[in-house]
Amino acid sequence: MSEASFELRRKLRKVVYWSHRWIGLLGGVFICLLAISGGIVTFRPQIANLLSPAAVTGNCVAQVDWNQAEREIEAFGHSKINRVYAPAAPETRYRFRMMTAQNSIFDHVIYDGCAGKVTGTANLGWMDWLVDFHHNLRAEKAGRTAAGWIGLLLFLSSLGGLLLWLLSKPGVMRLLRIRGGLLMQKDLHTTTGLVSVLLLLTASFTSLWLCFPQTMRGGLAYFTSLPKDSRVPRAKKPGEETPLAGLGDIMKAAETKIPDGSIREIRLPEGYGNVQVRMWREGDFRSLGNNVVTVDRATATVMATNLYETKPTGDRVVQAMAGMHYGEWGGLLFRSLYGLAGFGAGLLFVTGFLLWWLPKRLAAARASKTPARDAVTAAA
């Protein structure tokens, strides 16, 4: 390496080091809160199943009448259904989120599709609180924007840590080296960062797509085909006396459009409007499915069908961002790694802070002892 190249590399490393340190110190607390909450939210489906009443054993009903089930569930929950989470086989428990939200906290009613009856409720209010905090910092639209900027800080900090390693003396053995004493903080920081950096970069980059969708879509449009407006027309509001279509009618309409799909999630509006039915097909990478059928809430008429396999590359990229951010790729193994990376961000902040704080304390301690040593030397 020439002297000029070495000097350029040294200056670049200094700039990256300064940026990495101060981004971590100034934004570290907020990054940790979002990363750790995201690590917990990643396991939301598993936690929901764990906290739900046990499935009923015995013979299954031939076929659930979902219109009748809707009435039973709303009578039990004393509220309208807001969202339906349908299970993947062999699980039989459906989770219904009810429209009793107070500050984004919901009641969750469990319906066993095998037994054909309501089995109780799941205490998931704390999870609703955590999800809203992770998405919006409990501050709605303004919070979503703030969360996006925190995601950007995490992306820059993670990228800076990776560049620092590449600009120093990268080696595989450094990943496994944990020395004692004061060097332990540095080794823990380096090892944790390098082991989790790819997952942290993925989580932070995909968060930008969720928090700044129009900006990110606009950037993507420069490189690949992407429809300027892919929004589904909203159903016309009928007369006030028009009854809403039953849940079973909505499900049947969606299944007719995608007969080889399995319903995984239904998002119901409050009153009239569009219903989003997310469906899983063989080969989908998202556990909730890559395909969406939009249905009119009043008439159960299909407004649009969004088949992932027919979408251009741009739309596929956009949808992949959400799936990756929520840990829906790779099954439980990927969720586990993703969750650990979120907790790893907390360890990175603690060790990074100690790396900055301890040398200052040690220097101050040495400085306080120097006058005393000078006085003894002078007296001698």
Image (cartoon, rainbow, N blue to C red):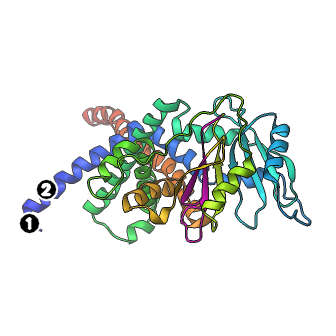
Under circle 2, the secondary element is helix
Residue underneath mark 2:
8
Report the disc number at residue 2: 1
Identified by mark 2, the residue type is Leu
> Which quadrant is home to the C terminus?
top left
Q: With 188 as the anchor, is 120 left or right in this view?
A: right
Label 2 crowd (10 A; few <14 / some 14-19 / many >=20)? few
**Magenta residues, as a range?**
272-295
The Cα atoms of the two marked residues, 1 and 2, are separated by 10 Å
**Residue 190 visible within the image:** no
> Where is residue 373 shown, x and y percent of the image?
32, 36
Using the image as rendered, state which of residue 7 and residue 269 is in the foreground.
269
Residue 63 spot, x, y in % from top left: 83, 61
SS state under label 1: loop
**Image check: 58 left or right of 73?**
right
State the count of labels: 2
* Label whose residue precedes the other's in the sequence (1 or 2): 1
